[in-house]
Amino acid sequence: MLALVSDDVLSVVPSDPCWQPDRATGQRVAELVTSLTLVDGDGGWCEVTWHDDVALVDCGGNLERIGCLGCGRQLDGEWWRDLIEERHTSGSGLADLAVVVPCCGAATTLDALEYDWPVAFARFEIAVWNPSRTFDPGDGRLDDDAAAAVERALGHPIRQVRAHY
Ligand SMILES: [Zn+2]
């Protein structure tokens, strides 16, 4: 029989896709996020990554809808996945987020589309795998006070992505 294993991930990233903290700041903030989200013995862990290029911080199976803020229509998920894949394999990565959407022809950027649940684009990521429920205010994200503390420590506004795999 196959074992069905699923993981929940809370990712904390800077709101500016290109922005990166220095190593010491990034490590310090990762320790803060760990203290806010993980309890020893619960089995979760924290990964901190400085990406060379802008990377997609995916929400996995939580992505239900991508909308265009220009015309309000829903974008085809296949079109979006193909586009992300193509930019990764073409070698230019996601350095250029510019996109012309097929629904209304508007020129916009990938990070300005409406994602439900949210995804993000980032060059720095703190990923907490299987965070403890004790921190969870209900929607699996840091609450306002915790998020504000992380932003102060990072020196930059943050976005949070909840992924399920
Ligand atoms: Zn549109």
Image (cartoon, rainbow, N blue to C red):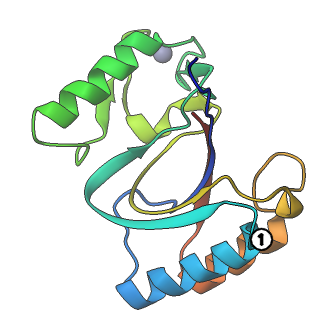
Please give the name of the residue rendered at 72% of the width and 80% of the height, measured from the top-left corner.
Answer: 149
Does the image show residue 105? no
Quick check: 94 above or below 148? Answer: above
Is residue 5 positioned above or below 64 on the image? below
- Tag 1: Cα neighbours inside 10 Å, few (<14), some, or many (≥20)? some
Q: Nearer the viewer, residue 14 or 59?
A: 59
Give, as a three-letter code, the residue at label 1: Val
Q: Which residue bears the numbered disc 1?
A: 39
Query: In the image, 79: left or right of 120?
Result: left
Residue nearest the viewer, comparing 99 with 150: 150
Does mark 1 have its CB less than 8 Å from ligand 1? no
Q: Give above or below for 120 relative to 17.
A: above
Residue at 38 percent of width and 20 percent of height? 80
Residue 92 as seen in the image, left or right of residue 94:
left
Where residue 6 sits, quadrant-wise, is top right
For numbered disc 1, what is the local secondary structure? loop
Q: State the residue at coordinates (59%, 81%).
A: 31
